[in-house]
Image (spheres, grey):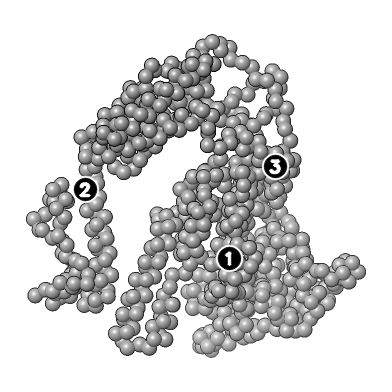
Amino acid sequence: MRSQVSAQSHLEYRPSGFHWRRRWPRRALRIWTPSKKIALLFSLRSHVLPDAKALAQKLTLLSDIAFAGVTERTMAIAPDIMERLLVELCRFLIEAADVAREMEALRTPEAAAFDLACANAAMATLRHAIASRDREKARNPLREVACRLGVPLDEADPDWQRLAFRALRVMLDAEQENLRRDQGDFGGPSPAFQTARSLLDAGTPSAVVQPIAPPAHPASIVPPAKPAMPDASTIATAASMQPHDAPRTGFSPPIEVAADEVIPASKASEAIPGTSVCPDILTGSGRYIEERCKGYSSFKPYEQPCSKAGESWARNSAPNARSTASLFGRIFGNKPADQVSDAEMKASWEVVARLPRNYQAKTSKMSPQEAADDADATERHNAEITRAKLEKQGASPGKIEFEILKGRIRRLRTATIYRHMQDLQRICVYLKKRGHLTKNIMEDHIWDSAELARRDILEEDNERLTWFGKLEGLFRSPIYQTKLEDVGDPMFWAPLIAVHMGLRSEEILQLYLDDIQIIDKIPCIVLKQGPGQHLKSQASRRTVPIHDNLLKLGFMQLVALRRREGEPRLFPWLERSQSKKTFTETFSKRFTKYRQDHKIYDAQRDFHSFRTTFNDLVILAERQDSHRRALMGHVERDVGITNYNPSGFSMRTLRDCVNAVEVDISMIRSPFAEVATAGVTDLSAHRTKTTA
């Protein structure tokens, strides 16, 4: 016995549970007979109606795609081929006329009037063909275009009628465009004028232009002949011309050359940055990133690049700019930037706001629009299932709402979207300064400070928290309780150094042994810009005394061990990441996995939270703000300190400030201590110690 579930197509209920059943479509059976069975039947292995509905919807969608694929494979003229043929036909007609117009000799008023009459006659012929549905006028032009593109054209296909009729309209549009151009109406200023105006607005001085040598045989250039009357063969001949082989009139900015040197027109646009042809989004972004990596930032005509700044930008900011370029290259179909309209730009940010947080434009098989739509559909589907299950269990409305909200897909945060906006605007400003854009197309789309603040307020809290109340859980994890294979494991030492001294992760992980010095009989860490070392700012150059807790755990013993081993770094086995070339990127992944494995992970408490914790502990110890800023590497703005105490504070003063930070390390086992003497307080470790 079986019953059809009326609310859901292809869904049946049988004693064994819900089943999905669908007949083979007739259009598919005419092409392919898969089996003797007249229907597909799958058990959904469920008696729960919401679950069965969800599975049935997915199977129905997949079968629709499969059946459509079976039938579409037999079409000789697919939709994308049809579109390509029509676009190329139109482009050939217009470009061929442009080449003929540029190379034609001086003509008399009578010849111009005759050409105008021919153009009008051609348009009248095409209009008559459209009115009478005479598709023969488009047959030869379509054959020529298909032949040049290498596209097989099946004129017996039913879609041939549609293609030919659309070709008539395209040919009429092209003739009308050619007529307007022949009368001097090009639909706007020339590319050369647009580039010149943008260069003038940017303050670029004019270059000295030297005459280019004329061709050796000017008489060999013969303008193409015009037909006597415009008929179908005339249009086909125009379509069959070789516009790509003919000389183009693309704009080349003024180039200073020697008197005896001739620069080909094809190389002129490559001689200086900024051409009239706007590059596509990925190409333009790539040029911007390349120049920033070289050390350019303002892109002024006489800017001198700073290689050090370029290396820093390439390491810290280039990956973000590349991700923005990849994202919007996919959103806009990698079209030239000057073809992006305001409406498209507005719609793009609406898509970005709906993107899942884990979406990767460079590697994902789905487009951003598809990923956003899929996330919305999945979220709705999950909410329906959760609601149905909880309602069946008799859960309260509060619990149902909580579980539905908990199951939402995380989307891009406001800060991430704004970062994409900033990077895209910088790319647009670069393209404008290089003469590719007449205006910054992001100018009216980036959020102002008020809008950014409004969105921040509406967003769920995700600010970084301190490790207050959580350090004990971290210090009772295995790495702080058991004997280490490597007594200098950065997973052990780096968090301790950060929470006791307020250092940043990269400042810790890149330490040389020479950075650990004895100053005024006080062990200190000297933070400076050395070979292979990078500091965040000028204020980051500082000297911080080592906390007594670190000395008790054997920090100086580790330094002595590394010296005996002949290692230059404190953590010699750390490797830099491939993308940002930093130790932090590699170490952060390991630190995150360690916390997840030992159930102490919290997204709002990361490694940088140790530095925040140190800052708060210094404040709680009621130490001077000037001392705190000196230890943290923050900019000092007190004139009494910067002008009257330029040499800084004594190491004794800073040591007292560092040691004012109280952190309980009684449960931590020193890497250099024996098990029998280690004062650990972890229960399992204590049992191990007592039974040994």
Residue 128, percent from left and from top = 31, 31
Cα distance in 3D space between marks 3 and 1: 33 Å
Q: Secondary structure at mark 2?
A: helix
Q: Earlier in the sequence, mark 3 or mark 1?
A: 3
Name the residue at 71% across, 74% down. Answer: 501
> Residue tagged by mark 3?
201
The one nearer the camera, 382 or 434, is: 434
> Residue tagged by mark 1?
415
Task: Check disc 1: other Cα within 10 Å, few if <14, some if 14-19, many if 20+.
Answer: few
The one nearer the camera, 181 or 346, is: 181
Cα distance in 3D space between marks 2 and 3: 56 Å
Task: Check disc 3: other Cα within 10 Å, few if <14, some if 14-19, many if 20+.
Answer: few
Q: Quadrant of the N terminus?
A: bottom left
Q: Is residue 692 left or right of residue 136?
A: right
Q: Secondary structure at mark 1?
A: helix
Name the residue at 78% across, 79% down. Answer: 657
Cα distance in 3D space between marks 2 and 1: 47 Å
Q: Earlier in the sequence, mark 2 or mark 3?
A: 2
Name the residue at 58% across, 57% down. Answer: 445
The one nearer the camera, 139 or 375, is: 139
Asked if the residue under mark 1 is in contact with the one under mark 3, i.e. CB atoms within 8 Å, the reply is no
- Amino acid type indicated by mark 3: Asp
